[in-house]
Amino acid sequence: MNDKSQAERYRQEMLRLYGKRRDDAPLPQPPSPAENTAGEMDGHFSVDGDAPDHTEGEDYNTRFPEPDLSDIDTDTGSAGTEDSVPPEYPTGDSLGDSTGYIQVYVRTGDSSSAVEGADVMVTAIADGQRLILASGVTDISGAAPRFSVPVPSSDLSQAPDPSSRPYSLYDISVTAEGYFNARSVDVPVFEGITSVQDFSMIPVPSMMSSRDETVTYFNQEPF
């Protein structure tokens, strides 16, 4: 078989596969008005005004029912009023008789540099009053001193269903000149373990002179 015959065979096979017409095939002709019994002519196509509407009625709704979205949870969650309630303890002693640790790092919002001189405070509410458990100032690397805080004994975490939390919950507040205040609430701290908290401070716009606004981060309690 020569190259010309092989090329023609390949061409015929492509026409068969993709439905292309041959160059010598006659073009389809539009129907004449006499032959057009389906309706009025609209260019080369006709529209039958009496055709049934299949998009309405019981048959269409049965074939194409509306999707059931009742099982889809569209609630992405939000901070409710209960989230803003700080942890409360009946007395200061109820925070625990063991020791846990909190390490705070403070950086700019894009984490490009450390925030030196930020005031950091660890608090909890006991007997209806807010107690300051620890406080300090960040150094040139943006790190505050590692704070020691009272927590329950780790023995509680060994029980399958402890009667009380095997950890204490604390609020951590950070203030720095030129930045919005920041607060992280319900920070869990276990005995002998250091809870690391990273703060990304948001600069106050130049047209604002107050730092009264506070950016709050909500922590989830461990399960």
Image: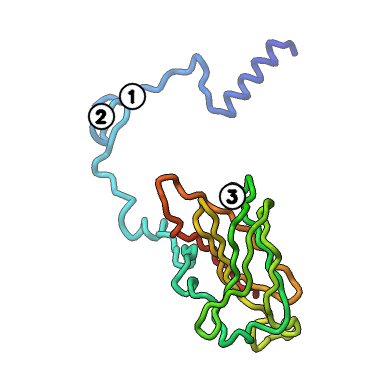
Percent across and percent down for residue 213 are 44, 59
Q: CA distance from mark 1 to mark 2?
A: 10 Å
128 sits to left or right of 188: left
Q: Which mark is residue 108?
A: 3
91 sits to left or right of 54: right
Label 3 near label 2: C-beta < 8 Å?
A: no
Label 2 near label 1: C-beta < 8 Å?
A: yes
| Position of 134 relative to 215 (above/below) | below
Q: Earlier in the sequence, mark 2 or mark 3?
A: 2
Q: CA distance from mark 2 to mark 3?
A: 71 Å
Label 1: which secondary element: loop
Front disc: 2 or 3: 3
What residue did someone put label 2 on? 41
Q: Amino acid at mark 3?
A: Thr
Percent across and percent down for residue 124 are 57, 76
The residue nearer to you, when weighing 194 against 209, is 209
Q: Quadrant of residue 144?
A: bottom right
Q: Residue at x 53, y 60 (%)?
A: 182
Q: Amino acid at mark 1?
A: Pro
Q: Earlier in the sequence, mark 1 or mark 3?
A: 1
The residue nearer to you, when weighing 71 against 19, is 71
| Position of 133 relative to 66 (above/below) | below
Q: Earlier in the sequence, mark 1 or mark 2?
A: 1
How many marks on residues?
A: 3
Q: Quadrant of the C terminus?
A: bottom right
Q: CA distance from mark 1 to mark 3?
A: 72 Å
Q: Quadrant of residue 198?
A: bottom right
Q: Residue at x 44, y 18 (%)?
A: 26
What residue did someone put label 1 on? 30
